[in-house]
Image: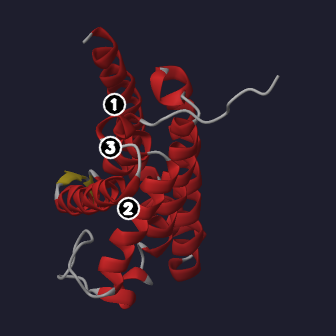
């Protein structure tokens, strides 16, 4: 007997099942997702020498709610907006825009966001978004991969020691809090829907 490995992500409950209406709904959701990413990039918390944005939280919530396909598509649309020179990233336009900004110190983290969305979206497509522990584990793996990509890129630019000191260590506690928060919010939304 075959077992279905794919379940519907949270947002699928709000979309029409087929046709142009579904496609239009997905497009609107992707645009709304990029707006959330822009807002989260511009929302900064100062902790020591670095700004911590709310972007990882937004990526987690988008991927867990949208699933892998729409989540990755949303992140790619966001990256395309940035590549076209729109000031969508943290510290843009102050620290540059477009491809030049994307190839700078945050380039590895930006690419890592797309991979993060794929990992968390994949987990959501398999129903892990209904279980806080499973979702936390998937998000933690996604976080480690994203940080690894960011660290590797930054190490090429400024060396591994400085990359670790300024590109990883200051973000560990804040990002763990964001993982725990996101891993709690999405299953809580599912629980609320089951009650109604």
Q: CA distance from mark 2 to mark 1?
A: 21 Å
Per the image, label 3 sits on a secondary structure element best described as loop
Q: Residue 22 placed where, x, y %?
A: 35, 52
Q: Could you tell me how far apart the alpha carbons at marks 1 and 3 are, in whole angstroms?
A: 25 Å
Above or below, comparing residue 178 to residue 166 in the picture: above
CB of mark 3 within 8 Å of CB of mark 2?
no
| Real-space CA distance between mark 3 and mark 2, rounded to the nearest whole angstrom | 16 Å
Can I make out residue 49 in this image?
no
Question: Which residue carries the number 3 mark?
Answer: 15
Question: Is residue 119 shown above or below 176?
Answer: below
Q: What x and y, as percent, mark residue 168?
A: 47, 56
Residue 107 numbered tag: none
Res. 31 image quadrant: bottom left
Judge depth for marks 1 and 3 and give the one in front: 3
Q: Image quarter for residue 9?
A: top left
Q: Is residue 128 or residue 161 the one in the foreground?
A: 128
């Amino acid at each position: 007997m075959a077992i279905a490995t794919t379940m519907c992500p949270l947002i699928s409950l709000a979309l029409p099942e087929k046709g142009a209406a579904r496609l239009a709904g997905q497009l609107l959701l992707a645009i709304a997702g990029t707006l959330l990413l822009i807002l989260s990039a511009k929302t900064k918390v100062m902790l020591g020498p670095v700004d911590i944005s709310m972007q990882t939280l937004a990526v987690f919530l988008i991927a867990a709610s949208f699933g892998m396909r729409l989540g990755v598509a949303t992140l790619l649309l966001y990256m395309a907006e940035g590549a076209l020179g729109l000031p969508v990233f943290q510290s843009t336009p102050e620290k540059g825009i477009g491809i030049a900004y994307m190839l700078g110190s945050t380039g590895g983290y930006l690419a890592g966001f797309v991979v993060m969305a794929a990992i968390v979206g994949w987990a959501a497509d398999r129903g892990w978004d209904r279980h806080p522990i499973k979702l936390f584990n998937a998000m933690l793996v996604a976080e480690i991969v994203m940080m690894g990509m960011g660290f590797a890129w930054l190490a090429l630019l400024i060396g591994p020691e400085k990359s670790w000191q300024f590109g990883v260590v200051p973000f560990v506690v804040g990002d763990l809090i964001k993982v725990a928060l996101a891993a709690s919010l999405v299953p809580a939304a599912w629980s609320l829907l089951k009650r109604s």
